[in-house]
């Protein structure tokens, strides 16, 4: 139960941070067409998960509870793209290059396909 609470608290913090950071970056970019805010959040999240995963794995500096709070909770609320990046890099690091490539391809194709399918499904329902 404690881990669920940590994920929930971390997720709330991460979601608020995502809202603030992406909004600030988007406004600072002055662009109305390119999603610089989302790009920034994804890149920042990937950098932070890289730092935290190395500290946890190589130095043992994060307890399991802190990993749940920060990696699953805060970064999960901030961006799940960081998890995708970390898991893909772990596959590549472990010599599973084909799995890493398949994860990239499947995530892009199925993710974009699911967005397309969802948009079209709801458009058919609410015609």
Image (cartoon, helix red, strand yellow):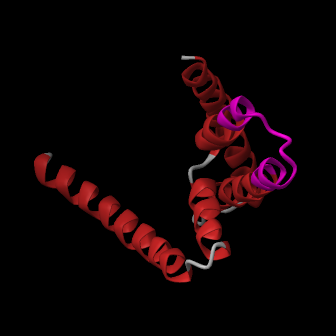
Q: Image quadrant of residue 124?
A: bottom left
Where does residue 123 sit, x and y in percent of width and height? 19, 53
Q: Image quadrant of residue 65?
A: top right
> Can you say whether 65 is above or below 56 in the image?
above
> Can you say whether 122 is above or below 112 in the image?
above
Task: Report whether residue 35 is seen.
Answer: no
State the residue at coordinates (84%, 50%).
55
- For the magenta stretch, what is the residue range? 52-69
> Can you say whether 62 is above or below 58 in the image?
above
Q: Nearer the viewer, residue 34 or 22?
A: 22
Q: Is residue 4 left or right of residue 105?
A: right
State the residue at coordinates (68%, 53%).
41
State the residue at coordinates (45%, 77%).
102
Q: Image quadrant of residue 120?
A: bottom left
Q: Is residue 5 left or right of residue 53?
A: left
Where does residue 34 sit, x and y in percent of width and height? 60, 66
Residue 55 painted magenta: yes
Residue 15 painted magenta: no
State the residue at coordinates (39%, 63%).
111
Where does residue 113 sit, x and y in percent of width and height? 31, 67
The quadrant the N terminus occupies is: top right
Q: Is residue 66 left or right of residue 84?
A: right
> Can you say whether 49 is above or below 88 in the image?
above
Q: Nearer the viewer, residue 28 or 108?
A: 108
Task: Report whether residue 80 is seen.
Answer: yes
Instruction: Count up the numbered dots.
Output: 0
Q: Nearer the viewer, residue 27 or 84?
A: 84
Main SS category, magenta section: helix
């Amino acid at each position: 139960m404690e881990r669920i609470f940590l994920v929930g608290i971390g997720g709330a913090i991460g979601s608020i941070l995502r809202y603030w950071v992406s909004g600030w970056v988007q406004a600072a970019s002055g662009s109305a067409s390119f999603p610089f805010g989302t790009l920034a959040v994804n890149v920042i999240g990937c950098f932070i998960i890289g730092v935290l995963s190395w500290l946890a794995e190589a130095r043992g500096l994060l307890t399991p509870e802190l990993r749940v709070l920060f990696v699953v909770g805060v970064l999960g609320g901030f961006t799940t793209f960081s998890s995708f990046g970390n898991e893909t890099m772990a596959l590549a690091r472990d010599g599973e290059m084909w799995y890493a490539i398949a994860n990239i391809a499947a995530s892009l194709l199925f993710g974009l396909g699911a967005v397309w399918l969802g948009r079209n499904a709801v458009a058919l329902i609410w015609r």
